[in-house]
Image: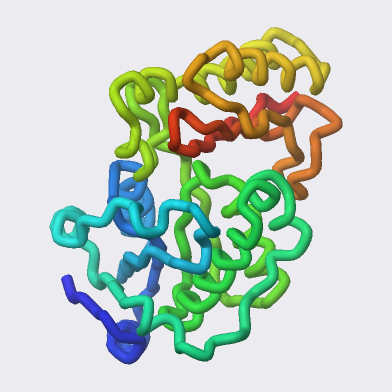
């Protein structure tokens, strides 16, 4: 496994693979890798000749007062995990390497970036789109793998690729969960033991909606209310939103069938998100 720290190094590594006619996959991450990230690596390994993983805690997607400085970082552990998975190249740039001091141009996510997470975290998706666009430019992957846990991010990246004509196929991969249903997330490390137990309320809210939908409930507002009630019954959780949305437009769903249930809440001081597809008609 080769490690690149500069733009020139990662470009050269990819260029060599291209010269050999190899298919390249990219798995963008912010590090603090867990089984969810590694599932993306395995999906990429199954579909590409060369797998590149980026590890970069991107400052532009964090807002004022968010956890940029505190975000978990353990580069040596991450590198060992990726080597064990047979990753070919790891890109670990510094902030200075990725952003010039006078950088001004960013990528606007449009209306998709203004709702839900975008409303709660203004500017977040502008930072996401900008760094993903830069990574696509540097690595020029044939395939890029993103987890469905960050569902709105996945929808926005797919829209960006379509609208800006990036020659890359974006592949969404299923959420990986703990045995009790909690979606794996690097931020789970912030949770105390009591908060960790309470954090399963997001999954329980989604399962409540799924159970109602499978039982024939077709009222969108009824399912949303059931999710809200589930989260609000947990003393350690503070609900941000619980909704059913169209999986392509992220607008509030008009039908339960095929909708995506999304939920965000703060458990203690840790903000968590989760989602689940509702059954199709």
- From the top left corner, tell me how far across and down residue 35 is, in percent: 29, 42
* Residue sitting farthest toward the top: 215
Q: In this view, does 150 lie to the left or right of 17?
A: right
Residue toward you, 123 or 170: 123
- Give the position of the C terminus as an image quadrant: top right
- From the top left corner, tell me how far across and down residue 184 is, in percent: 38, 37
Q: Is residue 173 left or right of residue 153?
A: left
Above or below, 106 against 179 in this view is below
- From the top left corner, tell me how far across and down residue 151 is, in percent: 58, 45
Residue toward you, 20 or 64: 64
Q: Is residue 113 left or right of residue 197?
A: right
Above or below, 119 against 1 in this view is above
Q: Kindly identify the residue that appears in the image at 43 percent across and 33 percent down.
A: 183
Residue toward you, 105 or 168: 105
- From the top left corner, tell me how far across and down residue 257 is, in percent: 75, 27
Q: Kindly identify the residue that appears in the image at 62 percent across and 78 percent down.
A: 106
Q: In which quarter of the image is residue 207?
A: top right
- Give the position of the N terminus as an image quadrant: bottom left
Q: Kindly identify the residue that appears in the image at 33 percent across and 22 percent down.
A: 179
* Residue sitting farthest toward the front: 65
Q: Quadrant of residue 48?
A: bottom left
């Amino acid at each position: 496994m080769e490690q690149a720290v500069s733009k020139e190094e990662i470009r050269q590594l990819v260029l060599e693979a291209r010269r050999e006619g190899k298919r390249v996959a990219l798995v963008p991450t912010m590090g603090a890798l867990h089984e969810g990230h590694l599932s993306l690596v395995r999906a990429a390994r199954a579909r590409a000749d060369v797998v590149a993983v980026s590890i970069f805690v991107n400052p532009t997607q964090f807002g004022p007062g968010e956890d940029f400085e505190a975000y978990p970082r353990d580069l040596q552990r991450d590198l060992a995990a990726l080597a064990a998975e047979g990753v070919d190249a790891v890109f670990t740039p510094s902030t200075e390497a990725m952003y010039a001091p006078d950088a001004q141009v960013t990528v606007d996510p449009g209306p998709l970036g203004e709702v839900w997470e975008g409303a709660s975290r203004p500017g977040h998706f502008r930072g996401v789109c900008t760094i993903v666009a830069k990574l696509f430019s540097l690595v020029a992957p044939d395939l890029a793998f993103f987890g469905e846990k960050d569902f709105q991010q996945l929808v926005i990246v797919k829209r960006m690729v379509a609208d800006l004509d990036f020659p890359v196929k974006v592949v969404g991969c299923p959420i990986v969960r703990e045995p009790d249903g909690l979606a794996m997330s690097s931020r789970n490390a912030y949770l105390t033991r009591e908060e960790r137990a309470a954090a399963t309320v997001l999954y329980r809210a989604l399962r409540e909606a799924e159970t109602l939908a499978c039982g024939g409930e077709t009222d969108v507002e009824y399912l949303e209310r059931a999710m809200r009630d589930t989260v609000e019954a947990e003393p350690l959780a503070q609900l941000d939103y619980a909704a059913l949305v169209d999986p392509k437009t992220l607008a509030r769903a008009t039908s339960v069938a095929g909708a995506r249930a999304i939920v965000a809440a703060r458990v203690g001081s840790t903000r968590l998100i989760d989602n689940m597809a509702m059954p199709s008609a």
